[in-house]
Image: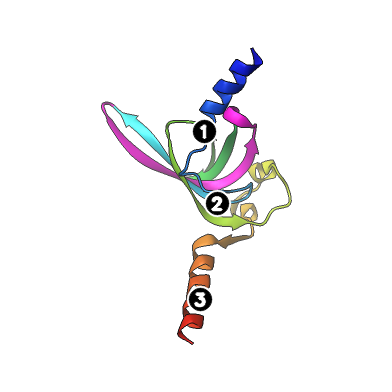
Amino acid sequence: MSDLVRDVTFKSSAKNKNIAAFETGDTVSVFVRVREGDKERVQAYKGVVLKLQGKGASRSFTVRKISAGVGVERTFPFASPSLDRVELVARGKVRRSKLYFLRNLKGKAARLTSELVGLKDENKAAAAESEANA
């Protein structure tokens, strides 16, 4: 019986290639496939990762964003077929694994210290290019 459970879990937890490596406190853009009638489109959901939970096929993450002044949290399973891709926007500097305290903060107090990922990569590329030219 345990072999059957392990086989099913292993097959369903096949790693999605379009998910960037991220941690709690990072700002991510989650692109979700949405069905409307017989059409399908991809919708972006950008926010801060509050928590990562579980392991194996049941692993999931929760993203929080502020929409029209109201906090909205959404939990996404890693193995979900509706998950198109996840892109890392910024790395957050946090010292906790669960950021539930952000629920009680409002406005500027709810911001985390973060570093944009794209700018850091561009700076490295520019530095490597200038060294090659020198």
Q: Secondary structure at mark 3?
A: helix
Q: Residues within 10 Å of mark 2 (few under 14, many from 20)?
A: many
Q: Pick the quarter of the image with the N terminus.
A: top right
The amino acid type found where label 1 is placed reads Ala
Viewer can see residue 107: yes
Residue in the foreground of this view, choosing between 22 and 38: 22
- Of marks 2 and 1, the one in the foreground: 1
Residue 119, how many percent across, how many down? 50, 67
Residue 88, how many percent across, how many down? 51, 52
Q: Is residue 94 left or right of residue 127?
A: right
Residue linked to disc 3: 128
The answer to whether residue 119 is above or below residue 88 is below
Residue found at the far left of this picture: 38
Q: Residue at x 48, y 39 (%)?
A: 16
Viewer can see residue 68: no
Residue in the foreground of this view, choosing between 100 and 115: 115
Q: CA distance from mark 3 to mark 2?
A: 27 Å
Residue found at the far front of this picture: 3
Q: Is residue 130 left or right of residue 23?
A: left
Q: Secondary structure at mark 1?
A: loop
Q: Which mark is residue 14?
A: 1
- The total of numbered circles placed on residues is 3
Q: Which mark is residue 52?
A: none
Residue linked to disc 2: 27
Q: Residues within 10 Å of mark 1 (few under 14, many from 20)?
A: few
Residue in the foreground of this view, choosing between 92 and 68: 92
Magenta residue span = 37-58
Residue 126, how many percent across, how many down? 48, 75
Q: CA distance from mark 2 to mark 1?
A: 24 Å
The answer to whether residue 33 is above or below residue 132 is above
- Of marks 3 and 2, the one in the foreground: 3
Q: Earlier in the sequence, mark 3 or mark 2?
A: 2
